[in-house]
Amino acid sequence: MMAADSGSSVLIEKEFPKSEKKKTTYDVIIIGAGPAGYTAGIYCSRAKHDTLILSGILPGGQLVNTTEVENYPGFENGIMGPDLMITMRKQTERMGTTIIDDEVVDVDFRHKPFKILTASEEYECRAVIIATGASPRKLGLQGEATFGGRGVSYCATCDGPFFRNQELIVVGGGDSAIEEATFLTKFASRVHLVHRKDQLRASKIMQERAFANSKIQFHWNSEVTDISGDQKVQKATLKNTKTNESATLNVGGIFVAVGHIPNTKVFENRVELDSQGYVVLKDHTKTSVEGVFAAGDVHDHRYRQAITAAGFGCMAAIDVDRYLTESK
């Protein structure tokens, strides 16, 4: 800036900062930022691949809605779910991975480089890891949202040990519900299995185990219509769908086991999905498209644990490293 003496004209030289072009090309783009995505980022970056994670609208995945995590190795006294995800994110960034909190709205896997379109930008890469996870189906009750992490759970393996000597409810009638109910009898004083029909959908062997378990009480043609309590779940209202009669149960927790929805809408007609919408793996973590890999709950409908998702993230990253090395 140059200024003349008083009374003379003033000449102002305005400096405009040079706009730097946003980096949009990477070796690897990981879609999703849960345990699978973060672990994949760590391994890809350590292998010296320029790596981007597009976290989506819920960075951290399902664990951000989880209270205490006891079964993830390395934390003697447990760790809060959100804290675990923050720690993973920081470690991933320290390894050199770029993380952008943006949602992927479309992908183009027809040609290389692959194109990934978000709400605000278009990116290109040589390899993709799909790690968008899955979301539990919900009952749609207000109390379900109110007591999420305070008595309402979607994972008996994760949270069952917190409910020792309490009466619990499991909602559902398939294999997952029966498996969860049976598992919970290790800790609960009684498990009420609530199913909206008069017979189970679970496999015969699962049904036989449940019927033989004296701790499991069945509530047929019933559904949970209300969940209440003070600071945590204390009561649940059941309604019989045939008689319309309602009853209240004093319970310490409600486990919803009516299935999961894989977060794969954006990948329809882009990679092969199974009848439930999960990504189909062809060889280890490879999908139906060469150069596109998958990790975690987005393909795994059996285990659905943070530690297994992280393991799949490691596997996918190693497969990506081999693919990129060979394709050079």
Image: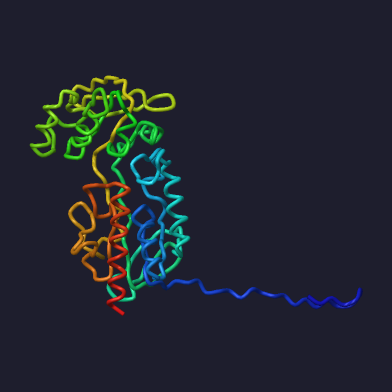
Position of 261 relative to 280 (above/below): above
Residue 193, picture quadrant = top left
> From the image, which quarter does the N terminus lie in?
bottom right
Instruction: Looking at the picture, tell me which residue is in the foreground, 286 or 326.
Output: 326
Relative to 10, 255 lies left or right? left
Q: Residue at x 20, y 61 (%)?
A: 281
Q: How many marks?
A: 0
Where 13 sits versus 254, above or below? below
Q: Position of residue 32 (x, y in %)?
A: 37, 57
Residue at 30%, 68% (x, y): give it: 320
Corner quadrant of residue 80: top left
Q: Is residue 139 left or right of residue 60?
A: left
Q: Position of residue 111 (x, y in %)?
A: 29, 76
Q: Is residue 141 above or below residue 113?
A: above
Residue drawn 8% across the image and 37% down it: 204
Tell which of 292 and 39 is nearer to you: 39
Residue drawn at (17%, 27%) of the image: 220
For the residue pair 141 and 230, the one nearer the viewer reads as 230
Quadrant of image for the C terminus: bottom left
In the displayed orientation, state which residue is furthest to the bottom: 328
Where does the image place residue 9, in percent across and percent down from the top left? Answer: 85, 78
232 to 13, vertically: above or below? above
